[in-house]
Amino acid sequence: MSTVKIGFLGAGGIAKAHAFALNSLRYFYSNTPQVVFESVCSQQPESRQQFAESYGFRQAQSFDDFVQNEAIDTVLILGPNKVHADHLKAVANMPNVKRIYLEKPVCSSLQEEKDLAELALDGRKVQVGFQYLQTASVREAIDFWKSGKLGKPIHFDLKYYHGDYLQKSYRDKRQTRLTPAPDGGAMADLGSHGISLLLAFLGEKLEITSALQGGHFADVPDDSDLFSLISLVDRKTRAVGNLSASRISSGTGDLVQLEIYAEKGTLRYSSHRAESFEYFLEDTRQWVTQPVGSHYQPISSFPSGHVPPGWLRSMIHGHYLFLGGQDEKAFVPDLKHGLEVQRLVRETATHLDFYRKQLAKYGEK
């Protein structure tokens, strides 16, 4: 069995989830390499040292020492949004690195998009952290959609909703997440996952036609969206639809909901019923609930096949694919996909800026 020597750039909450996922691979898949946690790097020496001790990393290093570490062959970029692009550029120059896992968003500006599009990766594998693509029922729903049984899309709607930012105490702890798009805000943080899902289902021909923004709190900058909605058109099929992202939708928990209405039927998915997806066929005039459970390829049944899939389970499968695992049904988000998501997030920011200016004019009348 091969060995991978992994380095983490970032030691926050999401880094803990990635450490868990990598440690869990051997429980689900027999054909995975041995994982060695070689190094962790973060800005604060105390936090990176504590992370290394807590999660079994051989050492904690400064950034300069990390990028000179020739033992590392696999890097996970998990730091703040604003440093993702710089970290990717630096890691691309590490001579022994073969694989790079890049948390979303891939970057925060148009210039960074251009820089990453031209980045010389020399055959290195880059996978972007849109783990919802590896949710068992989403994988099966994408496969069913691409079978063509529902025909061409006509219109669609996707929601990704939280409610936590309704609480001031929650907002106070996350001031760094309230920066303007494309670096921050609900559309960048949550909506990017929704954009990624739409691109996986509909293809990379989506364009934004308009945007709206809602919700205002005195302690939140006006250019940080708490709720935003974008209208989109698929240039290939002329299907139209909306995507909304919210941090202030009361009672939603962690809701990802997708509906695609097509010529021959409808497809529905909701994270509140993550063990299945639904479809309706015009020919039969019936709704069908398609149970999925934790159906992954290769088949894994830990602790049993009927256990409902969850957020961390999809991340584990994402890392299985990242380290070379094979799954023909999986949509694996590469850097090109990540940049296409980022284009739409950036254009959302432009549309939201236009909307705020128009709203200010209405207030003057």
Image: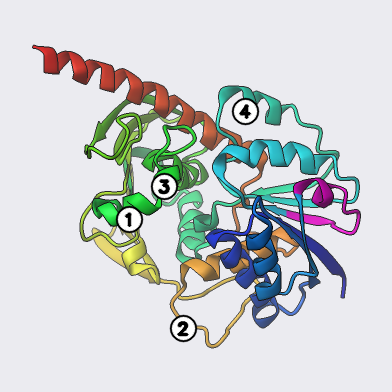
Q: Is residue 64 magenta?
A: yes
State if disc 4 and disc 3 touch (CB < 8 Å).
Answer: no
The residue positioned 34% from the left and 29% from the top of the image is: 223
Quadrant in which the N terminus appears: bottom right
Cα separation between marks 1 and 4 = 31 Å
Image coords of residue 73 (percent x, y): 84, 56
Horizontally, is 170 left or right of 306 in the view?
Answer: left
Q: Nearer the viewer, residue 177 or 172?
A: 172
User: Which residue was labeled with disc 2?
Assistant: 306
The kind of residue on which mark 4 rests is Glu
The kind of residue on which mark 3 rests is Leu
Image coords of residue 338 (percent x, y): 59, 40
User: Which residue was labeled with disc 1?
Assistant: 170
Colour scheme of the rendered structure: rainbow
Cα separation between marks 2 and 3 = 28 Å
Q: Which residues are magenta?
A: 63-75
